[in-house]
Amino acid sequence: MEPKESRPETAVVTAINGPVVKVREASGLSMNELVVIGDRKLLGEVVELYQNGATIQVYEDTTGLEPGTLVHGQGLPLFVELGPGIIGRIFDGTQRPLSASFQESGAFVTPGRTVEALDRNKTWAFSPRLEAGANVFPGQVIGEVKELDHINHRILVPPDSRGSLLWIAPEDVYTVADRIALIEDPQGEQHELSLYHRWPVRRLRPCRERIMPSEPLFTGQRVVDFFFPLAKGGTAAIPGGFGTGKTITQQQLSKWADADIIVYIGCGERGNEMAGVLGDFPRLLDPRSGRPLIERTVLIANTSDMPVAAREASIYTGITIAEYYRDMGYHVAVMADSTSRWAEALREISGRLEEMPAEEGFPAYLASRLAQFYERAGAVITLGGERGSVSVIGAVSPPGGDFSEPVTQHTRRFVSTFWALDKEMASARYFPAINYLNSYSGYVGALASWWKEKAEPDWTAMRDQALQLLKEDARLQNIVKLIGEDALPDDQKATYLGARLIKEDFLQQSAYDPIDTYSQPEKQVLMLRLILRFIERMREAVRHRIPIYRIMDLPVLEEFHRMKTAFKGDDPAPFRAIEKRLEEEFEGLLRREVQPARKED
Amino acid sequence: MRDRSGIEYLGVSRVQGPLVFVQGVRSVGFREMAEVVAPDGRTRLGRVLAVSEDTAVVEVFEGTAGLSASRSKVRFLGQPFLYALTSEEVLGRVFDGLGRPIDGGSPPMAGEARDVNGLPVNPVARVYPQDFIQTGISAIDGMNALVRGQKLPIFSGSGLPQAQLAAQIVRQARLLQGEERFAIVFAAIGIKHEEAQFFRKDFEESGSLKNVAMFLNLADDPSIERLITPRIALTTAEQLAFVEDMHVLVILTDMTNYCEALREVATSKGEVPSRKGYPGYLYSDLASIYERAGRIATAKGSITQIPILTMPDDDITHPIPDLTGYITEGQIVLDRGLFQKGITPPINVLPSLSRLMSDGIGPGRTREDHQNLASQLYALYANAKRVETLASIIGEEELTAHDRLFLRFSQQFERRFISQDSCENRTVFETLDLGWELAMIFPAKDLSRVRPEQISQYGLKKGPMKNGKTSPISQQE
Ligand SMILES: Nc1ncnc2c1ncn2[C@@H]1O[C@H](COP(=O)(O)OP(=O)(O)OP(=O)(O)O)[C@@H](O)[C@H]1O
Ligand SMILES: [Mg+2]
């Protein structure tokens, strides 16, 4: 992993076509090797090798680059620096630290690299956890650094080193580059360790064992947690046309999901969205730790005006960082917004390489790249023996909102949870616009036992009942479209009304309401239980021939509309009060309306 | 910038569409500018699209008609397309699509010369836009509020009054509090003379002409020039906003013509097209234009962008509106059906969106009920459209009394709320009150997206504004 100390290999630029550059005299370069081009130090990567020549994709704007410019091989593939000082920061697609870059060169990002990813001057308090003489293996904790108050950054033996610990630094402060340990490998060679190490972004970080995801990733979003849940270590895709809510949903998950660390990758999307996160997250508090959300968040930004090749890299940079924290035994959730822009970056580079296009101009390897990406998610036993996970949530932006296009179709094959966003719901400002009829989750079975043991034994039954009702309602909606609501018999109207309660008073959830934005699991259960109870009583009343409009006029319904924004859910009392009212009002209704019918009972 | 004056290549090896291929070149940089001298001695500007040790491919902005392969000369300028200006040099003036004066004045040159392609903005430097701009148009202020530094395009169809709408926004736009130096940068991209003339007259009549810089590439101007026009306009806007601290409104019209020029070049280069023949990088290319809006921490000014585009065949899923919608912070969609019903501006609020609205409105900015009311009106109108469809199937008589309320709501919402005169300037409070009046067509229990307290405070209040004074049209009720 160490960079070649010998003289870097050089080659010469022969042609420039946007981000794709051809070079000659390239026999010293290897596939996927990182290169630095010219005096401006543009960063690139070898993507094709042929006799004496190579093709390089350049991560920066190539304006002004001329044939004849020298290219220096770096002797290692595109890597990230992994060590303390990542959390709470924002990096670009190739881990350029954007705050430092702003300090140094102002509001605009100029090509060429001048600052290191991890601050070389900052010091960290290191506490050793092993003593000299110990035998060490990959993934073992040799010491700890408090990265932030509540984030213990474990310094691990890198996945590719093992041997005996000759020396370890005493408790003190060190910079990331200082030597903190010396290891002698079985071949007798000595290796220095510092607080950080480099890791090639395209290489999966190893773990001891993959395990089945079985614990929910709570998001505080009712439609997700109750209907289409995600497990820690699971994968989800969120496809939808523009403006249907991909970004807001991912931001909601970044805010409220019960992961330890969030990696948010803005891949080819808007600069203001990143600015929004940078503005909000230091102010908002994590409901679990009480600390500002930014203190568990890493941002990777390749905005749509940044170079397209770095867009391709940004996804890997993000997921590698996620795996690194997973290896310390953390639960990490990765948001990638949007994987379609990443796929388009692949397409653009592939087109310029004059590769044979497959569907809609995408290269034939689109599917395998997508699969590789989602396969880096998972719940694992780490090399060090801890449990950790990486969950991946990828936004997909299908052209024209049409899900039959290649990126959506292939993604579907590799993810277990699918949150399909719906244009029509979004245009009625019904949010989250997750279509409950064609969304699904492959984790329902696995999570059912978790719910049963740890939270709410009725979860599966409640979920089934509510979804069943929504399906019936969808069938009725088709009839209503043709004959009008009035023509339905009362028991069907009851289905219709019940479904409306579920849709409006449970599923609909505003990201902008200070209370409704996050709904803890207890509250979700309380709410849905009330609604299902109402539906049950309504059906009973209908069987007693109470006209449906009487039921719709019950004053308690107003409480139903209010409950999501009025109560946090930490106290069940208000929900009990509503339930009491509900029972009383139905009793009253039955007493007044159906004296004769009652006698039959 | 290297000095290579003197090196001139005689003859080009190939001319293909807007491209010329020059052979035997030495040290030519990617994207650098070139001058192509035609046999008649006239010089045309171009730009290097691709370069190898032997050949440079140059796109010629003014087209290649009349160029001869053997007798044309090419000079490479050793630098990208640079533009330098100050506000004094450009405001109140008219330039061509490449930024050269066409009003008889002298070319701008005083400011710092900048590459018209711009640079990506570091997201750390961005200041999240949240100052509400009152446009005086209810469909925008009430339902899709615009904020300073936003990029909010108008999606139009051929023959729809997008120019009138844009001009009305320009005329009426103001902040609720405070006034600062403002400027308008107007880029015509392949539009008709009369449309450019319409804007000019409108600026003139409203007295804002002295604050406007106009860059005109008209329908009969060279099409490849269109690739530069919006970039010159945005370079100008950046100087005004980020160097001279002005608040700049940029109108780019019509982006569809821009995309067609891009397709023309891509096709000539023989690139593999993606959807409808447009190049696969259309998204990134458009983003390099649209992302040049916003506010940055190092300057007080702002750039608000209103790009206008024509949806080919009124199809919002066409790649041009589709990719635009994926980049911009919302869209205002004009609708032929509404226009034919006599609703102007014919804004269809359902597919329209302002993503920055929620941060720009609310207590202390507009009014506390704004967000909820807008959401309520959306829900009612969306349902009303459903009921209208139903009514057209089963007949209005068959509707429930409740459903008939929706028909009434839909009519009034379109005729009184959306429709307004092109010189009618409503305050946002008038807009909200009118919205409440329409929502109150329904009983309170139907209004589940507003809070009961809001209904009593705003919905049931009797105020002077409820007597139809808000709108001359409302009196027709
Ligand atoms: N949960 C929500 N609560 C309230 N409003 C929402 C919610 N989700 C989405 N919205 C609204 O929808 C708008 C668009 O959402 P968002 O920006 O997430 O769309 P998107 O799918 O990411 O679009 P694009 O593909 O263009 O980036 C938001 O600006 C917001 O107004
Ligand atoms: Mg988005």
Image (spheres, coloured by chain):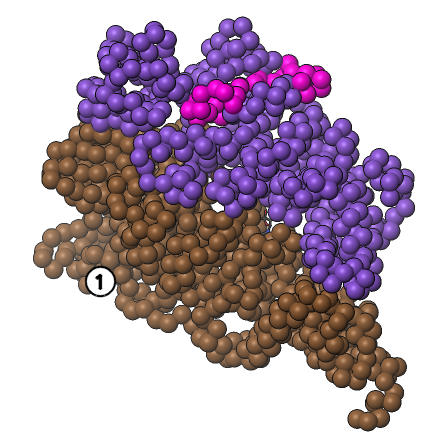
Nearer to me, B433 or A185? B433
Q: Give the magenta-colored segment's residue range.
A: B201-230
Residue visible at 83% across and 53% down in the picture: B441
Q: Chain B: what color?
A: purple
User: What residue lies at 29% left-to-right and 52% top-to-bottom?
Assistant: A364
Give the vertical position of A288 relative to B289 (above or below): below
Query: Which quarter of the rendered picture does the C terminus of chain A lie within?
Result: bottom right
Left-right relation of B278 to B34 = right
At horizontal 35% and vertical 15% (from top left) the residue drawn is: B66
Q: Which chain is brown?
A: A
**Chain ID for label 1?**
A
Report whether A537 appears left or right of A185.
right
The percent coordinates of residue A34 (x first, y second) are 23, 41
**Disc 1 designates what residue?**
A137
Where residue A558 appears, x then y in whole percent? 78, 65
From the viewer's perspective, is A108 left or right of B246?
left
Residue A481 included in the magenta stretch of the image: no
